[in-house]
């Protein structure tokens, strides 16, 4: 299990285990990691766990997020990376956890079959011990875990539960309820995106692949895109529709 060391002026203030798939960092007490400093935005950055990887994403903060001395919008973290937020440093350490986390609550998995034309055009992933799973993996642990700061509360998710309905391909008609804080879509090594559930609504973000997902026929680019009712999502050549109940 990965962890973060919160440091100030070279002194470790606190250690955080990334035992959920989305951690937020910011000045407000509703964040998982609260940093009470005026240089830190209310919701400054997020740590996203996708499979065995951890990404840091800047949430359009005022002063930005810096990794190893370079400003970043989104970046895959490696052992020993240093994330600067305001006057504080978060040092990232990755630990190989044996087996799955018993406290992790997963939604059911929906298979995404990659059309042959898309698979042929995509670069072959590097060899790994086990073949990547061609799935839409619904994830994110429950946010009911205790807050990391005294008096802090987990951020409340969007009020209306969302759903993604597959419109084309072998899974046409299947629906995936977005009841977790983080839902991963795609196939590792080809194209991966995540849908995050925030207080402001649902947002889709590109994580991996040469092409970013499309929403209503337009590529979303590198920034998180808020999803609206009946938006059409295209990923791996498969079209899906987003709805709220």
Image: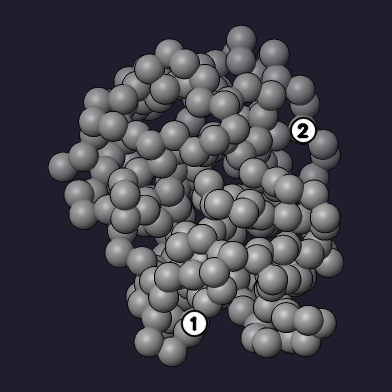
The image shows residue 63 at horizontal and vertical percentages of 62, 54
Q: Residue at x 82, y 57 (%)?
A: 68
Q: Residue at x 25, y 26 (%)?
A: 230
Q: Which residue is mark 1?
A: 148
The image shows residue 13 at horizontal and vertical percentages of 68, 87
Q: Which residue is mark 2?
A: 125
For this orientation, the residue located farthest to the left is 245
Query: What is the CA distance from the residue labelled 2 to the residue labelled 1?
Result: 37 Å
Q: Dot 1: what SS?
A: loop
Q: Using residue 75 as the reference point, say whether residue 78 is left or right of it.
A: right
- Of 93 and 119, the residue lying toward us: 93
- Of 50 and 105, the residue lying toward us: 50
- Of 58 and 201, the residue lying toward us: 58
Q: Earlier in the sequence, mark 2 or mark 1?
A: 2
The image shows residue 237 at horizontal and vertical percentages of 51, 17
Foreground tag (2 vs 1): 1
Q: Using residue 149 as the reference point, say whether residue 72 is left or right of it.
A: right
């Amino acid at each position: 299990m990965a962890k973060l060391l919160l440091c100030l002026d070279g002194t470790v203030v606190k250690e955080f285990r990334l035992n959920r798939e989305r951690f937020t960092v910011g000045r407000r007490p509703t964040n998982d990691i609260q940093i009470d400093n005026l240089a830190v935005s209310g919701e400054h950055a997020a740590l996203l766990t996708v499979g065995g990887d951890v990404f840091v994403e800047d949430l359009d903060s005022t002063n930005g997020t810096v990794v190893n001395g370079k400003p970043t919008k989104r970046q895959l973290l490696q052992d020993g990376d240093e994330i600067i937020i305001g006057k504080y440093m978060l040092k990232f350490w990755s630990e190989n956890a044996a087996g799955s986390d018993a406290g992790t609550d997963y939604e059911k998995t929906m298979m995404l079959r990659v059309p042959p034309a898309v698979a042929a055009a995509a670069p072959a992933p590097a060899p790994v011990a086990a073949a990547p799973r061609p799935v839409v993996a619904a994830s994110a642990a429950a946010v009911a875990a205790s807050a990391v700061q005294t008096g802090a509360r987990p951020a409340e998710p969007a009020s209306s539960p969302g759903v993604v309905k597959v419109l084309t391909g072998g899974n046409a008609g299947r629906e995936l309820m977005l009841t977790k804080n983080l839902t991963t879509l795609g196939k590792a090594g080809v194209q991966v995106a995540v849908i995050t559930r925030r207080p402001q609504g649902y947002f889709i973000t590109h994580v991996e692949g040469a092409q970013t997902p499309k929403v209503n026929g337009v590529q979303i680019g590198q920034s998180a895109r808020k999803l609206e009712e009946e938006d059409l999502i295209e990923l791996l050549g498969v079209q899906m529709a987003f709805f709220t109940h």
